[in-house]
Amino acid sequence: MPKIDARLKELGLMLPAKMQMPAGVVLPFPWVNVRGRRAIISGHGPLEADGSIAGPCGKVGAEVSVEEAKALARKLGLAMFASLKTELGSLDRITGWVKVLGMVNSAPGFNRQPEVINGFSELVLEVFGPEVGRHARSAVGLAALPFDLAVEIEAEVEISE
Amino acid sequence: MPKIDARLKELGLMLPAKMQMPAGVVLPFPWVNVRGRRAIISGHGPLEADGSIAGPCGKVGAEVSVEEAKALARKLGLAMFASLKTELGSLDRITGWVKVLGMVNSAPGFNRQPEVINGFSELVLEVFGPEVGRHARSAVGLAALPFDLAVEIEAEVEISE
Amino acid sequence: MPKIDARLKELGLMLPAKMQMPAGVVLPFPWVNVRGRRAIISGHGPLEADGSIAGPCGKVGAEVSVEEAKALARKLGLAMFASLKTELGSLDRITGWVKVLGMVNSAPGFNRQPEVINGFSELVLEVFGPEVGRHARSAVGLAALPFDLAVEIEAEVEISE
């Protein structure tokens, strides 16, 4: 069994199905774009196991609590791993996480974006370990996100050829 | 005639003149920064043919409709192609689009950022085709943009040496 | 004396101490992540000489003036140089600035983000010169930032091995 798949199993983590696109939505780009040894990951939202968008949706600090948002960021991480596995064939091809941009749909006055995105960063470190999982990061407050997602994250990883 | 220039002509598309900077504005950075085989593209706004800022300006979902904003994202794409042509000499040097960050000046409650940025993505695919034009993407809602632009996009492409 | 250290001294500039994290805050990522010849820089805020967060905090255009925010962006630049020096050993290893994403905590109607981020860009150019310091840039308005920072910037530089 590939190493990262074994690690996911050990942690009791399951990757969700491919995102079920809401009716009428066309996204003319891939979830992961490979160019040489770079795999650039499009903005992802959190998914349920069946690939439907995971809620609650709305603004963190108002409709969504910081604890709920942190849990959504962790679900989002699993959705990103699923996209990477589909594109790369195996998650073992990832030789290093490069960077993460965590975007939190923020209510006026909400300033705890890092706690929310820690749900994602902690998952990456648990699954990939401190060397491969090490990533630069920003965690910031957006005015609005597609589908009223509470959290959206884009990232980049380095891969073996 | 270079291949991409011929393709633009075939599609009836013209690149705008270099951006006319509003009075008193100094931007101490280039529109495109080449480092090795990477060409990193600064945030661009939509331009008219003469290089003046293309309107309407303001928040999408309030002063600017989603259809207007999508058309602005397409104009923005042509402005970006113009900057790339100036910096690279020829658009044929572009071997692959890497990533796109689409930033939409969003009114409260506006959540259709992907439709807006599709105006840009569809143009890239029409002009560069599905392989070279393939790009990772995020499309998100900003609280404010310079000059009250409705849309701003930054991107990166891979180039031949 | 390393060349960039000498240049900082010549300009009378001092790098601040490492950031003093506010109580209870855990950031599970490094300030700079090196992958091959890329050094990717996490989102930084402005620091005082002792590593405490530099204020004023809040929204630019309301609680924070554009002049104050520009000065904060310059302080932020020195904090980023400090992180780079810690990670790289010497700032002379930087062979080229690649890109800068300037995020301004923006009050409704504030649209002068480029002036604010010029405080950072001008510092990079003063210290590293026009060739090494050359960078692609976006300067945009965020709805909220961690700790109510007025300005946050992430960036990437190219380094010698």
Image: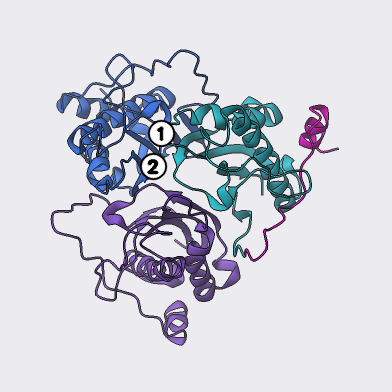
Chain colours: A cyan, B purple, C blue
Q: Is residue A139 above or below residue A35?
A: above
- Separation of disc 1 and disc 2 at Cα? 7 Å
Which label is found at residue C145? 1
Disc 1 residue type (three-letter): Leu
Q: Farthest residue to the left: give it.
A: B24
In the rendered view of the protein, which quadrant contains the N terminus of chain B?
A: bottom left
- The disc numbered 2 marks a residue on which chain? C
Disc 2 residue type (three-letter): Leu
Residue A87: x and y, percent? 70, 53
In the rendered view of the protein, which quadrant contains the C terminus of chain B?
A: bottom left
The reply to whether discs 1 and 2 touch (Cβ–Cβ < 8 Å) is: yes
Residue numbers of the magenta segment: A1-25
| Residue closer to the observer: A122 or C141 | C141
Q: Is residue A31 visible?
A: yes
Q: Residue at x 37, y 28 (%)?
A: C148
Q: Is residue B61 toward the left or the right of residue C3 in the image?
A: right
